[in-house]
Amino acid sequence: MIPKSGLKPNSVAYERHPVIAPSGFREYDARWLFGPDLNLLGVRLLGLALGTLLNRRGVEPRIVTGHDYRSYSASVKDALIVGLMASGCEVHDIGLCITPMAYFAQFDLDVPAVAMVTASHNENGWTGVKMGLDRPLTFGPEDMATLKAMVAAGDVERRSGGALIDVEGLQARYMDDLCKGPKLKRHLRTVVACGNGTAGPFALEVLARLGCDVIPLDCTPDWTFPRYNPNPEDLAMLKAMAQAVRERDADLALGFDGDGDRCGVVDNEGHEIFADKLGVLLARDMAAEHPNARFVVDVKSTGLFTTDPVLQSLGATTEYWKTGHSHMKRRTQETGALAGFEKSGHYFLREPLGRGYDDGLLSAIAICRMLDRNPGKSLADLHRGLPRTWSTPTMSPHCADDAKYGVIARLTAHMEQLHRAGGTLAGEAIASVSTINGVRVTLASGSWGLVRASSNKPELVVVCESPVSEARMRAVFKALDAELSAYPEVGAYNQKI
């Protein structure tokens, strides 16, 4: 069963051979355009390879499956299950669900592995699988590369003993688990925005049970995504959330992505709070309850995690790490951190707050409980209580997949040499250069700029921040942009400041 390339849908060959484009195996997610890049025979081969990998790694061949609310997701999952069963796996299918519900099922059912069929917030036409063999972790680059090579070579093993178990009542147990704490004392008028993704019914029930006065916004699942994609970083979704807050005089809006593992926030004044700044607020709240707490944040995140005087007074320490939910989840687990915060909105809460996986509903509950512990303050008040910084949006100049890592390597070497030589950037001395993920250059004033390769797209990622002024932030970006202009492989930006 070696996959073929170049086969067109609505052809005999397409119905006889597996189609699974190698480009769909990303750094830590797997995503394909269903039809052109992946057919059901390809999905079946993927399941057979995944089950083979379980056996080769010595993992008990038992796995949770679930699917999001897209017209074809159940069919994709069924094909995946056929492949998993052919490899000898006992499959525990929980049906329609959000991704964190599948992660919860690994613990609830005591099953080691997971394969969640979802394209998250991607446009219609996309599908994908989030996979893991060691709860609460999901696949990183090495796992994905191994699976990709196995699929390409048809390197799979069929085994007997496969079985399918349809799990009943998991959705209710998941929501009961989220709602097991005390109800809120504070009456929070809460806009719940789901972009017609899978999270709608679950988010509404959980937040209502918590004690919120829930105001639904696009919470009915609809696989056509009639208004905008369910992505709490998308400006269209954020604008709708802000409008609903102002019209309904709400305390906040909570926005969930298509598969429910991320949460975005708009405050009571209708202003978005970027996920890294919200992470600082949550870290303050958590560190007050758990002194000397450790946190992990991704390299795109604000410098306030290390400079905030409140976090310093509480003895909190923070490590910056690689961007990507799989990287962040693993590092949070490895270091025993209380929580991890990624700028995209993936938050990872560990015991006693959570089990270490990213769950948008659990993040929303943490936000509501933070407000409950601050009865005299609005979310906007808490946000204004942070030291002021000026930051760019995440900007993404085009750079081909086969060129982007080379560009980053050369830029990193140049910045490290500049630092060693006592050089400057944007007229300031370079205080440090971090190469955890791309290159993050911090200047004497605390201003910084990051350039890294996108994990999922033919792009670079550029982010800058300054605690001094907007002008200083723009100067840092201008200097980095000038450096990038020396590389002909780097093209136009999706946006600029």
Image (tube, rainbow, N blue to C red):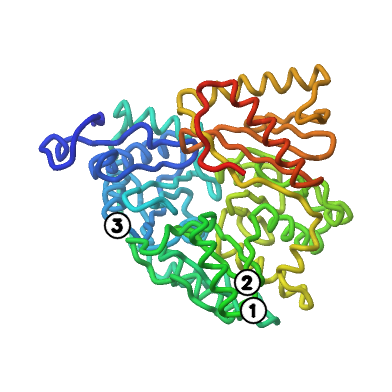
What numbered label is drawn on residue 252?
2
Give the image quarter of residue 460.
top right
Q: Earlier in the sequence, mark 3 or mark 2?
A: 3
Mark 3 lies on a secondary structure that is helix
Q: Nearer the viewer, residue 226 or 73?
A: 226
Q: Is residue 109 visible?
A: no
Q: Is 261 drawn above or below residue 326 in the view shown?
A: below
Image coordinates of residue 418 in percent, x first then y, are 76, 20
Amino acid type, mark 3? Ala
Q: CA distance from mark 3 to mark 2?
A: 34 Å
Image coordinates of residue 414 in percent, x first then y, are 69, 19
Which residue ends up furthest to the right in the rendered image? Answer: 313
Point 79% across, 54% down: residue: 388
Q: Which residue is mark 3?
A: 74
Image coordinates of residue 314 in percent, x first then y, are 86, 56
Q: CA distance from mark 1 to mark 3?
A: 36 Å
Q: Nearer the viewer, residue 181 or 244?
A: 244
Image coordinates of residue 28 in percent, x first then y, are 49, 39
Q: Are marks 3 and 2 in contact (CB under 8 Å)?
A: no
What numbered label is drawn on residue 188?
1
